[in-house]
Amino acid sequence: MKGLLGGAPLEGTLAAGVARAGSLRRDARTIGLVSAAHGLSHFYQLVLPPLFPVFRDELGVPYVALGLIMSVFYSVSAVGQTVAGFAVDRVGARVVMLMGLGCVSSAMALASAATAYWMLLPVAVLGGLGNCVFHPADYALLNAGVSPQRLGRAYSIHSLCGNVGWILGPAVIIALSSQLGWRGALLTVGVTGLVAAGLLASPTGTLPDHREGGEVDLAGAAGSATGLRILATAPILMAFAYFAFLSMSLVGLKTFGVPAMVTLYGVAVSFAANALTAYLLGNAAGIVAGGALADRVRRHEVVAVSGMGLAALLALVLAGAVAPGGWLPLLMGATGFCMGLTQPSRDLIVRAATPPRAAGKVFGFVYSGLDLGSTVTPLAFGFLLDRGAPRAVFGVSAALMVVTMLTVLRVRALAGR
């Protein structure tokens, strides 16, 4: 039966419409569940740092020692991400993700029982083991379960939920600690994560597995030896370097930006915290805009380089101490927006360099660069603050952003070959 205007048969039109609706529902389900888990992982990354002043007073340790806690967390996560990527490609992303969420949630609950500084170190190890799974599992699920024409926006929502987790982490833990004390607050957020893991594991959660998209090579064609050769290729190594330098710049702004602004500009801690919130909100807005842009452009490296270049200039303005303190939220928000704009495009660049059936290991490896950078820089930025050099926090972050511009161009050029 032809359509009323002589077009395609009505049955074909209806079938196509049903297929599109089914595809949209599938994409929305996959993006929603995976992004929610990603938001929780970022939430837990910023649960402990807001409590550092409390730990410093109660446990009698300097900030550099507290920075070591996060260094342990990120070093374990850095090593574990590549291993988790191989596990994802071998057994599937769903079970790996759920185990990770259980580990990081348990770590926060156990931290509530710490009575000495050393007790927080094994907590950091367990938290790092949980944190390491999310990027390889998430991107394997998204690449296999989301239609290609929506991948840019899928990456955008995924990153946005991570930023929402960063925004909520400090706010929630401070609010809960004011009501329940820091121990009650940590126990509450830990148990909440375990409940969330149970819901995602239940039939009603319906978390898809990327094996449904044929992304797992159970026959071993992309086994350990082949996988290691893939990771040793030039574009993948350069992508790893990109994420390492990116995380170094992010640590300077997110972890030590507040004390740096307080020292450099003489503003109140609450005002500096608001400026950091503006950075995170700006980053979230940039991710949304970047997702829509990434699905419409082909030169993703131009988007990535332009955004990071503008962010570096703004960070230099912050380092120059030439702007009044009242401009800090605006400057930090603009910096966050420019950096967020680059994220969906950079993920599509990595995807373009990823061989078939290797999404878990490749994304696990390159994203371990984030954890590697986050391992060494808390100590370095803590040292700068202890030595009275807050200006260097922003200056060094700007220099690292410039380096990321060079690496992303190399990834695109090498992948094109």
Image (spheres, grey):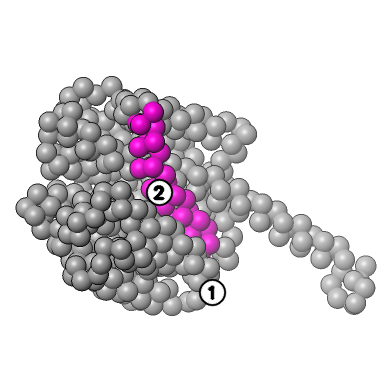
- Is residue 393 rendered to the left or right of residue 134? left
How many dots with numbers? 2
Q: Disc 1 or 2, which lies upstream in sequence?
A: 2
* Residue located at (50% from left, 71% from top): 293
- Is residue 247 rendered to the left or right of residue 64? right
Three-letter residue code for mark 1: Arg
Residue 340, by quadrant, is: bottom left
Provide the residue designation for mark 2: 167
- Is residue 92 rendered to the left or right of residue 316? right
Check the image and report above or below for 384 versus 207: below
Label 2 crowding class (10 Å Cα cut-off): few <14, some 14-19, many 20+?
many
Magenta-tinted stretch: 152-179
Depth check: give the residue in front, 142 or 234.
Answer: 142
Depth check: give the residue in front, 389 or 28.
Answer: 389
Q: Position of residue 185 (x, y in %)?
A: 37, 29
Label 1 to label 2: alpha-carbon separation: 28 Å
* Residue located at (16% from left, 55% from top): 263
Q: Position of residue 372 (x, y in %)?
A: 23, 51
Residue 227 seen: no
Depth check: give the residue in front, 196 or 209.
Answer: 196
Tell me the chief SS of the magenta region.
helix
Q: Position of residue 234 (x, y in %)?
A: 27, 67
Residue 134 belongs to magenta span? no
* Residue located at (55% from left, 51% from top): 31
Label 1 crowding class (10 Å Cα cut-off): few <14, some 14-19, many 20+?
few
Check the image and report above or below for 309 versus 354: below
Q: Quadrant of the C terminus?
A: bottom left
Q: Quadrant of the N terminus?
A: bottom right
* Residue located at (42% from left, 44% from top): 168
Provide the residue designation for mark 1: 296
Three-letter residue code for mark 2: Ile
Residue 35 seen: yes
